[in-house]
Image (cartoon, rainbow, N blue to C red):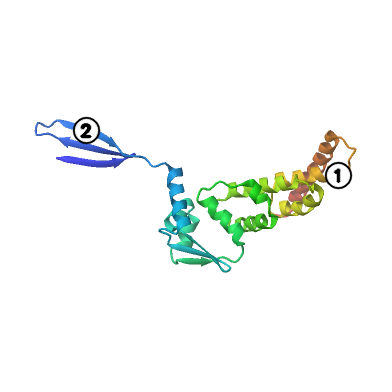
């Protein structure tokens, strides 16, 4: 008789002859790489093929593949299993499109993100309100985009507004970058070393104060 076993992208065939000899052979199956599968699903999404779930953002609709989204993050297994559509009111359509492109494996263009800080803020808020979603890399992309923006033409004006976003969404690298820009503007003759020292003193004071608050906190 012949036994068939599927394992590790191979079909293993085992057969036993009448003389009790056992023979085995393996036939390798063609592999479809993960990034190729993701790209194929993205192509289907753009063409509206095989989509079976709809997100509603304002008056806009975006169709996706339920199985693909669930594979990308287990968060969607719960929110998609009992319905075929979902209304989302706390994100702009531009920010949501970036989120979907990220989920479907598209490259995030930092320069495009830089163009609109409102879109970045909406996307960061969307991420913050869904801590169960694993969007750490997408949050980092947003931070890089804001760093690029704050290092642009209107550094000082942008840094003050962007620093508020850094505090709101706990973007430490961005906040530090804004601090340096503001220090440079306030102390145009101060050397880079002195500015760094001033910043570290401020950070050290903030750290020591937080330690004191923890010590003073009753348990």
Height in image: 94 above or below 182?
below
Place of residue 94 in the rendered image (x, y in percent of width and height, measured from the top left): 61, 58
The single residue placed furthest to the left in the displayed view is 18
- Between residue 125 and residue 218, name the one nearer to us: 125
Which residue is at 20% across, 36% downward?
14
Height in image: 11 above or below 93?
above
- Between residue 109 and residue 25, name the one nearer to us: 109
Q: Quadrant of the C terminus?
A: bottom right
Q: Which residue is mark 2?
A: 24
Gap between marks 2 and 1 measured at Cα: 75 Å
Q: Residues within 10 Å of mark 1 (few under 14, many from 20)?
A: few
The single residue placed furthest to the front in the displayed view is 47
The circle on residue 203 is none
- Between residue 197 and residue 149, name the one nearer to us: 149
Mark 2: which secondary structure?
Answer: strand
- Between residue 135 and residue 114, name the one nearer to us: 114
Q: Quadrant of the N terminus?
A: top left
Place of residue 62 in the rendered image (x, y in percent of width and height, measured from the top left): 51, 62
Answer with left or right where residue 45 lies relative to residue 1.
right
The single residue placed furthest to the bottom in the displayed view is 59
Place of residue 57 in the rendered image (x, y in percent of width and height, measured from the top left): 57, 65
Which residue is at 42% across, 47% downward?
37
Closer to the chain start, of discs 2 and 1, is 2
The circle on residue 185 is 1
Which corner quadrant of the image does residue 208 belong to?
Answer: top right
Place of residue 53 in the rendered image (x, y in percent of width and height, measured from the top left): 45, 63
The single residue placed furthest to the right in the displayed view is 189
Which residue is at 44% across, 54% downward?
44
Residue 70 seen by the camera: no
How many labels, in total? 2
């Amino acid at each position: 008789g012949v036994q068939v076993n599927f394992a590790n992208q191979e079909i293993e065939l085992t057969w036993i002859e009448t003389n009790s000899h056992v023979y085995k052979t393996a036939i390798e199956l063609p592999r479809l790489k993960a990034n190729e599968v993701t790209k194929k699903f993205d192509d289907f999404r753009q063409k509206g093929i095989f989509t079976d779930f709809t997100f509603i953002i304002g008056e806009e609709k975006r169709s996706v593949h339920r199985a693909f989204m669930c594979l990308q993050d287990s968060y969607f297994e719960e929110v998609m299993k009992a319905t075929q559509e979902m209304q989302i009111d706390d994100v702009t359509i531009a920010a949501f499109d970036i989120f979907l492109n990220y989920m479907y494996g598209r490259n995030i263009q930092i320069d495009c993100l830089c163009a609109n800080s409102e879109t970045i803020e909406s996307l960061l808020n969307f991420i913050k309100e869904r801590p169960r979603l694993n969007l750490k890399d997408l949050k980092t992309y947003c931070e890089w985009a804001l760093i690029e923006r704050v290092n642009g033409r209107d550094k000082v004006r942008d840094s003050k507004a962007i620093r508020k976003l850094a505090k709101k969404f706990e973007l430490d690298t961005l906040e530090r970058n804004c601090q340096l820009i503001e220090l440079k503007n306030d102390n145009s003759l101060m050397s880079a070393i002195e500015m760094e020292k001033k910043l570290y003193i401020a950070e050290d004071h903030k750290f020591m104060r937080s330690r004191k608050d923890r010590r003073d906190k009753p348990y």
